Image: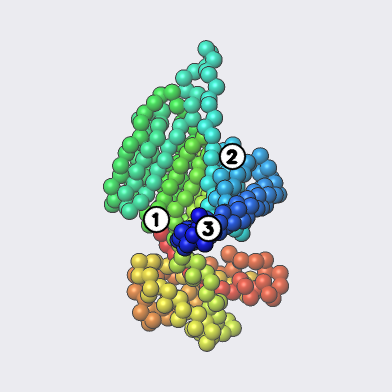
Amino acid sequence: MSMADNARRFHPVVGVAVAVLGLAGIVTAQHLPFRENIQDDLTTRSEQALQAAGLSSVQVDFIGRDGTLKAASTAEADRALEIVRGLEGVRVAVADVPEVAAPAPSPSATAAATPPTVVVTLSGGRATLTGTVPGEDARKRLVEAATFLAGTGPVDDQLKVDPSVTDAGLDAVANAVSAYGQGAKDVSVELRGGILSLAGTVASQAAKDAVAAAATEAGATVVDRIEVAKVQQELVKLPAVTFLDNSTTLTAAGRAALAQAARILTANPQVKVRIEGHTDSNGSTADNLALSRARSKTVLDFLVKQGVATDRLSAEGYGESRPARPNTSEANQAVNRRVEFVVLP
């Protein structure tokens, strides 16, 4: 058979298929080292960042842009994940915390050697309790705290009683749950391995501080992931509410700031606010107290005229008793002459 016959029998489709396969091979050959470069780079940068944060014991493994971390504890894993997820180029990062087997009890060890594990959550108005407690008294206290947290919402008690566990940390759980108060959202209080983790959204920084303090007072090791509600943050960011010197008359800038506050409160009709007036230390204590009260009342009246319901507002004056900064300079005194909005639970 001649070469001309062979050429005629070589179908064009075969040529196209050969070209496609060849191109795919080239792309694959180029892609593999590129992917390896990415994962090597992410692994190296993650290890360096973790080492700088004192977490050199955490192991990192990347496949492409997806990383897996191995840490010795949940608290260590949480810190490491926050660092790695913040690195440029990381798509997904998860942590693997191996369960540490408890040592076999000695013949002289008592049965009450295991710390309790308890989780209290509030979601959609329903409070749920899970875990193991040493007795009915501990169960009762936790259920009472969850009932207060839920308000009129249902409480799902799934706690189990096991006399072999201790009550270590249970006071902190109950204290923290109660301190959230009614009005908190997406609450999670978890006691595991002696670590108390707090999460959820509260109305104000004061509420956040109260929960953390209640937990810490009971001697727990606390991991605080509580967030302050958006409304409080927006009110804190407002320009200063200013008045004419030694007067309850608002300046133009003060009226503009309060107009913004009124818009925020109108957009969030469920929010109640306490208006707090403060002064510097110039003048007598009595005069400063009276001035701060009068100014906070002026702010309340202004907001009511802007359409904010009176029953959502309260006004207090503290005079010079709660300075934000020491009254040692004119700049600090200017900061201390202020009106603050505190979102109530």
Numbered disc 2: secondary structure: loop
Residue 117: % across, % down: 45, 34
**Residue drawn at 32 percent across, 49 percent down:** 126
Q: Which residue bears the numbered disc 1?
A: 185
Horizontally, residue 313 falls left or right of residue 254, namely left
Q: Nearer the viewer, residue 336 or 180?
A: 180
Q: Nearer the viewer, residue 288 or 208?
A: 208
The answer to which of marks 2 and 3 sits earlier in the sequence is 3
**Residue drawn at 57 percent across, 38 percent down:** 73
**Residue drawn at 66 percent across, 44 percent down:** 55
Q: Which residue bears the numbered disc 3?
A: 2
Q: Quadrant of residue 23?
A: bottom right
Q: Amino acid at mark 3?
A: Ser
Q: Amino acid at mark 2?
A: Ala
Residue 234's label in the rendered image is none
Numbered disc 1: secondary structure: strand
Q: Is 115 located above or below residue 69 in the figure?
A: above
Q: Quadrant of residue 137?
A: top left
The answer to which of marks 1 and 2 sits earlier in the sequence is 2
Q: Nearer the viewer, mark 1 or mark 2?
A: 2
Q: Could you tell me how many numbered marks the image carries?
A: 3
The residues tagged by marks 1 and 2 sit, at their Cα atoms, a distance apart of 30 Å
Q: Which residue bears the numbered disc 2?
A: 71
Q: Amino acid at mark 1?
A: Lys
Residue 227: % across, % down: 49, 57
Q: Nearer the viewer, residue 246 or 131?
A: 131
Q: Is 162 located above or below residue 87 in the figure?
A: above
